[in-house]
Every structure is written in structure tokens, then in C-alpha cells.
Amino acid sequence: MSAMEKLLRLFLVDQQLSGLEGRLGAAQRFLDAQSAALADLKATRDSQNAQLRQLLAHIANIEGEGDTIQQRIDELRGKMNSSQTNKEYQALLVEVGKLTADKSALDEQALELMEKADELRASIKETDAAASERDKMQGVAKQDRDKRAAEIKDRVEALRAEREQLAADAPGDALRAYEARRDRFDESDDVMAPLVEQNLKRHEFTCGSCMMSVPIDIVTSLMSGRFSTCTSCGVILYLEEASAEKLTAGKK
Ligand SMILES: [Zn+2]
């Protein structure tokens, strides 16, 4: 087998592998998205719970403060009952009035915060519901990913083994050039592309990747199965069987 044919076989195996792994990759990406969304919801719930704890502590403080004021009011009322002079009574009355206003302001504040706490509890419930829904989706996504992974496992293993053999058998410099392009480009037709015949009689050929014209010496080199690249884009060229037959027939 020529260098070109060896690389071409490797290329075909790689295309099958990336097709299989691409489908698995889509399932994996979907699973990752579900996991990320679930993690977000859990983080939201944690922060909502922390907010609620803070709010409840704040309410407890305010209620404690209110209780202290109420005790003071009760004390002053007792003193009012046993007050000796009207002046003393009036002074106590003023203080009780002021403390009562303070107490009712605190009560109002506590009530507002309790309403906020209720709203927060409702939000936490919503977050929990969304998280449990997302958790189910993550479960389904994981099953799907695992199922696809299991489906392609044997085929992928066989192709990897085949690839290893083909790579070991390919000429070193051609293989290095091939692997370098594979690392550099995502699209397979940037790695290897067929020679495209435009006009056989006029010896017009183009590169299957960049569509630029391919000089005749490259065509000759391909016909003898040598490792050849496009002079315009650098893609590794190959001859399709049909083109090879035509070219050989044309030469005779
Ligand atoms: Zn090209």
C-alpha cells in the first residue's frame, strides 16, 4: 500500500471515530448542561436558605428588643399606679407613650420582615421544585449518555485498534504531517481532501478543500501514491479510486 493509501485509510477510520464520538459528545454536552443548571439551582437554594436564616435572626432580634421595651412599659405602668404626684405621673406617662411608639414601630418592622420571610419561603419552594425537575432531566440525560457510550463502545474499540495499526504502518513524516493537521483543524476536509478533476484532457485539477488549481507534478506524485499536499492550502491530497482509474487510463 502506498503512503497516500495508508493515510487515506487512517483518515477514513478517524472520520468514523469522530462521527461516533460526536454523537456521544452531544449526549455528554446535554448531560453537562443539565448538571450545570442543577448546580446553579442548588447554589440559588443555598443562598435563599442563608437569606432566610439571616432574616429570621433579624426578626428574633427585633422581637427581643420589643419584649425588653414591653417589660419597661409594664414597669413604668406599675410606677404610675403608685406615683405620688401628678408631675411624676405625667413624666411616666410621657415615657410610656414614647416607648409604646417605639414598640409599635418595632412590631411593624417585624411584621414586614415576616412577610419577606414568607416570600422567601415561597421562592425556596419554587427553587426546590425546579431543582427536582432538573434532577430528573439530569438522570435521563445520564442514562442516554451511558446508553450511547455502551452502544458505540465495541465499535470505537475496534476502530481505535485499527487506527493504532494503521498509524504504526504509515510512513513517519506523512503521519506527523497528518496528525499536525488533525490537531490544528476541526473540519476533516482541512486535514485531507480529494484531488478534483476539472478537465482531464487539459490536465486541470483542483484541490477538494480550497478549490485552487493543483499543478500537474502534484497530480503525478499522487498517481504514484506519494504523500502530497496542496500548494495553496497545505491540505493532504488523495486520489479517489475513480479518479485514479481515469488518470491511469488517460496515460495509456
Ligand atoms: Zn488546497
Image (tube, grey):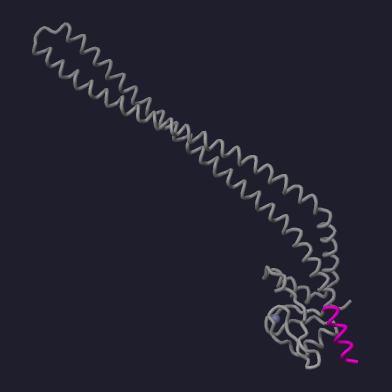
- In the rendered image, residue 45, in percent from the top left (x then y), is placed at 51, 38
Where is 147 relative to 74, above or below?
A: below
Where is 86 relative to 194, above or below?
A: above
Q: Residue at x 79, y 79 (%)?
A: 238
Where is 60 relative to 209, above or below?
A: above
* Quadrant the N terminus occupies: bottom right
- In the rendered image, residue 74, in percent from the top left (x then y), is placed at 25, 12
- In the rendered image, residue 152, in percent from the top left (x then y), is placed at 80, 54
* Quadrant the C terminus occupies: bottom right
Residue occupying the far bottom of the picture: 202
Residue 231 painted magenta? no
Q: Residue at x 81, y 93 (%)?
A: 201
Secondary structure that dominates the magenta span: helix
Magenta residues span: 240-252
Residue 243 painted magenta? yes
Write down the quadrant of residue 100 in the picture.
top left
Viewer-closest of 206 and 18: 206
